[in-house]
């Protein structure tokens, strides 16, 4: 089974970290194909960055079509997830959706700890849409995304402080790490705090493997129907769907 | 007051129709500046089209920055609304959000009638997020968007049949037209059915005028904070934010 | 366009303040007709006051019928709004509904700051009914309504302290002032705190202008159908509907 | 124990019917004191009638203060319930709230069948506020309230037809009769349909008895705090609260 | 009227306390029949204890069938309530459901104070299912259930501290005692804090009396249909239903 | 990895069918250990059957403790799931929870088709608690569970008819089979209807594998804390927890 992991921001070190985490949990027959977006923001912090990361994400999905059995969008904002599901003929997983569904099997109440305040409401909206609004809180720890790449930034201390507040104030029974750049910290934090700590990259790999092995893929009836054939103009013309809708 | 109305699809006849509707309701001191996206799909039908319409939308907002006091995104899917609000220093309105807020002043229960089934759940998700999920239903009338430009298509008959079902089965007290291509039909349908019929283009113009005249604009605290200065790469590099976050 | 602004309490200085605020934002062709209820409580603090303010409110609407194109109920509790909508042939706006709809265009999360604790849950119930329960919190600042008329009361200090708590603890991206007596403070507070501060009087004027100019009025199908002709007895006999239901 | 049952409309035959139903279920030590409003509409159909029934209701509560241990508002719209609870020092029960709470002990899903379409959304809003929105549907049977007083009106046939639709289409496990004028039909309908049929008058009597015998009364902390002493003007001056707030 | 009060844990002192509380509020014609489960945990703290208390509970209901007109499950977790309702031909009441419904007549917002953190989410889930999730918070006071039987345990001090937090931080207008072992404290706490304090045992007695006197019982249509006749094996064979489903 | 699949009803042919389905999707290193409850109902149809199936379920989990790395409860009602999670030191999965989480990755709106009406509301309550209430409907197809074991029963025809109604009336984009006895039909139905058809047994196997391979297990902080050591009496004494709580 081939899983395409696309980092929708353009920072390769983040792709590498996510791919490493994905490989670490992949089943023996699973190949992780890592791809970094070639156009868009170097990190995704808020709605503007996220919207402009989607063409780069879809471009990777499109150019490698036929080369993968499932895809993962390696950003906790689930950037472009609906568009990718409409486009692809194979299952597509987001980190947030995978992580909160996974946490739901482990705990009745949990907290997502993300980076910046500007991402907090965005993720809270996702959590509600995925049905976990009554069970999960979202907290920001005031860490710019790329600081997670820098051990000297103090980012981990801020993250730990926020996890401790979640445990003390939210009644959190588990923690979800709300940024793909935190993927390498999950095990250690789980050991420290003695509660399940869910990483979205790992969760998404397992959900992708599950769907492929069950022969399940995105419904093409209704809201994720394949794009209708139609012209796209200008710089976006390369994205014009070439086939009829399913 | 200058309101920039951007059609995020690239079909100029749809821009013209929306601009005509906007001008028809604009206050005497309001100038409507119509713009058509120069890159992306010729119509927005579903998540894939919508995501790829956003760069074209943002491009219009960006190039005309300083030339408008508020902006309207002339698509009922509220394509790119969050990104546009983060980007702009002036209020930005979507058709769906404006229309359902307006309908909420007129009726306790109402129905949105849109085009294709693939857009129905997308709009239903918006309606829920805007807080009207308990008051509004969304129906699709099986009309491809561009058929609304063709009087011979039978589209109006399908739309009327769906409105009649909404009145008979949903207990609808008002109707919201769920596509910018229906903007020219609102008055006539209101006369026929004797219930308020809300058009998103007109509603958005009024909300834009309201916000500007009240000196209110998008909060830059929290989820709509201005994009952080950072590099964007490849074909998206033109979108890199150049200023510091607010 | 003539907008009737009815203060449902009987304190004329509050009417004057609200009328001043309304005139300050009214479009050039809009005339604000201010009316003060002639029967009922001198201020509306809680359910009992509110219920007994409704006859006075409806009396103003009734006696001036035909003289206005829209009406505003100048109390943040939206006192009698449903009854007024059923009665009137023209649009009727409440301050709370107008303000929270307006805030929804500016911020994803916001806080309403009202006067007394006894009004907090009442307004919270309104906010939920209007669909903003997931996006807005309501706080009381322990200010009796009429203290807002007295500069020496310390009321503004209490209000500011509560706004500061909302910003620090709620993640509020905008503030809604939850009493018509606060209408004169909006601009100043917006300047101080750097977030949108929405005043219900101003918001309602703009929504009234919007509906009238769009040719939209309350649906007479369903829950806001015109009152059925029937006798009313005793002191209420003057309110008996004289026409057939719509 | 003395329970004051106030009919907030001015039709004495409806009071008589409700009082008869109340007496039929009252415990041996319970006295039912029936009162008919002396000012307001002859029946309550929609928001306008309801709002103008409140002074007459409160007047009965006020004039008989000290003569009753609990009060029931004998209208399924729970007209003036919040105001009455704020006013009274004893428990106050509404029919809708009592009936749906009672039905909740009997069935996981149920349907309320009321009279006119104009009352349907009003009651649906109550049902949601009381927390039963996810468990109960509300249906209208197109019966003007006073037709329930006329055996030749065909009203019962319409009511039965609507109950049958509720059983067939809603998965209703129980039925709530959504008008005080239906109180005499509950037993017979329960026998016919073999599901619990809950009448609001009877349910409210039992809840009133329960609260009084448990020594429980409306909280005077927060939203139902006693009205603050203040002037009321004009025709409403008689309602001015004379005591300090609790 | 005979009400069977079954304590689903096997500690007779807790049965005695609950029976005493039940008798104290029972109407003159009501006989309280107290029963203690003869198999299962000595106290119910969390999901595991609760599930294993159900056979003992059902056994009591089954062996005394025909000897009671209604039943109460004397545990605030509403242990086995759905199963008991399916089994019994008479009304069955839980403490949590009865208490929160009762509190709903007294206050718009209230707080349930229970024992251990492990019961908090369990009760919160019940509160949501009963429709009070938007009106009630649940707090744990860190008291093992059986400490409530020991005056020297300091349990009451912990309980009072938690009630004080609820009043100060939650805006609670009333308090619900979230354990049957607290039943003897309700009156005293109500006197101390001046807000309604609702005890589940007392509330359930009144609801049971109400349903029986109204001739209402659990619907046997739909989810509470009588168990279908079928074999049960092993140690559970005694529970096999012997009659056809209703 | 060893996954214990416990059928909580006592019908071995159903265990066999579920085990066969589990083995068919298990990864190469996964061993499925099938167990049939030795005490309780031969099928689980409604709340009463379900509650009395829990001791048999827990007994299997308890006796085989240490022999498995994860457990699956092979009944779509998620019978005893909370108790099992509290008891076990390893992940425990239910069919309903696994299936609806899986369907959520494939479709925005879907329908669960179960057997009898008496199970419909029970499952609907689960679906809501798992957060899918806004996205999923539940339908009953009027099939007694054990008829699914009998090819001549006509059960499959009824199931197909209900699926067809779901597609036509609910806007379902995917189907979830709401009974473990339907597990063998998933592939065929998916081929017939061209939408994803999710079987709970298969979904649960994959979720179990995912959690084990990720090193995640049920949180022991909060609501799923290990049972406290305490006596259990009578026939349940064997279930007394022997260790201290986590």
Image (tube, coloured by chain):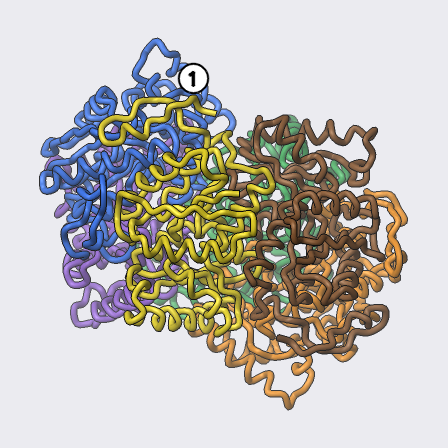
Chain colours: A orange, B brown, C yellow, D blue, E purple, F green
Name the residue rendered at 57%, 31% in the picture: B195
Circle 1: is it few (<14), some (14-19), or many (20+) Cα within 10 Å?
some
Residue in the foreground of this view, choosing between D228 and A127 = D228
Residue D163 sits in quarter: top left
Residue in the foreground of this view, choosing between E193 and F18 = E193
Residue A234 sits in quarter: bottom right
Q: Classify residue E180 as left or right of residue A104.
A: left
Residue A159 rendering spot, x and y as whole percentages:
56, 79
Residue F67 rendering spot, x and y as whole percentages:
56, 64
Up/down of B227 relative to E124, above or below: below
The answer to whether residue F193 shows anywhere in this view is yes
Residue A92 rendering spot, x and y as whole percentages:
74, 57
> What residue sits right under mark 1 in the picture?
D158
Q: How many marks?
A: 1
Secondary structure of the residue carrying numbered label 1: helix
Name the residue rendered at 60%, 83% in the picture: A155
Q: Classify residue E15 as left or right of residue F204.
A: left
Up/down of E46 relative to E8, above or below: below
Name the chain under label 1: D
Residue D225 rendering spot, x and y as whole percentages:
24, 54
The answer to whether residue F103 shows anywhere in this view is no
Up/down of F9 relative to F83, above or below: above
Residue in the foreground of this view, choosing between B11 and E230 = B11
Name the residue rendered at 59%, 47% in the picture: B127
Instruction: Residue at the far bottom: name it.
Output: A152
Up/down of D181 relative to F163, above or below: above
Residue in the foreground of this view, choosing between D116 and B217 = B217
């Amino acid at each position: 089974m081939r899983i395409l992991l696309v980092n929708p921001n353009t920072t390769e070190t983040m792709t590498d970290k996510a791919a490493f985490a994905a490989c670490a949990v992949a089943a023996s027959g699973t190949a992780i194909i890592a791809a970094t977006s070639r156009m868009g923001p170097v990190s995704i912090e808020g709605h503007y960055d996220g919207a402009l990361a989607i063409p780069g994400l879809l471009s990777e999905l499109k150019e490698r079509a036929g080369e993968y059995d499932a895809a993962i969008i390696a950003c906790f904002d689930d950037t472009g997830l609906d568009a990718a599901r409409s486009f692809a003929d194979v299952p597509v997983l987001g980190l947030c959706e995978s992580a909160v569904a996974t946490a739901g099997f482990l705990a009745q109440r949990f907290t997502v700890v993300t980076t910046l305040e500007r991402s907090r409401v965005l993720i809270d909206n996702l959590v509600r849409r995925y049905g976990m609004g009554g069970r999960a809180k979202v907290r920001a720890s005031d860490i710019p995304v790329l600081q997670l790449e820098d051990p000297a930034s103090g980012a981990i201390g801020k993250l730990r402080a926020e996890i401790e507040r979640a445990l003390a104030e939210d009644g959190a029974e588990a923690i979800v790490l709300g940024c793909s750049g935190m993927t390498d910290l999950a095990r250690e934090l789980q050991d420290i705090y003695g509660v399940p700590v869910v990483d979205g990259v790992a969760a998404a790999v397992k959900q992708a493997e599950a769907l492929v092995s069950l022969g399940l893929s995105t419904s093409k009836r209704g809201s994720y129907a394949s794009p209708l054939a139609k012209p796209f103009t200008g710089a976006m013309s390369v994205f014009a769907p070439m086939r009829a809708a399913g």
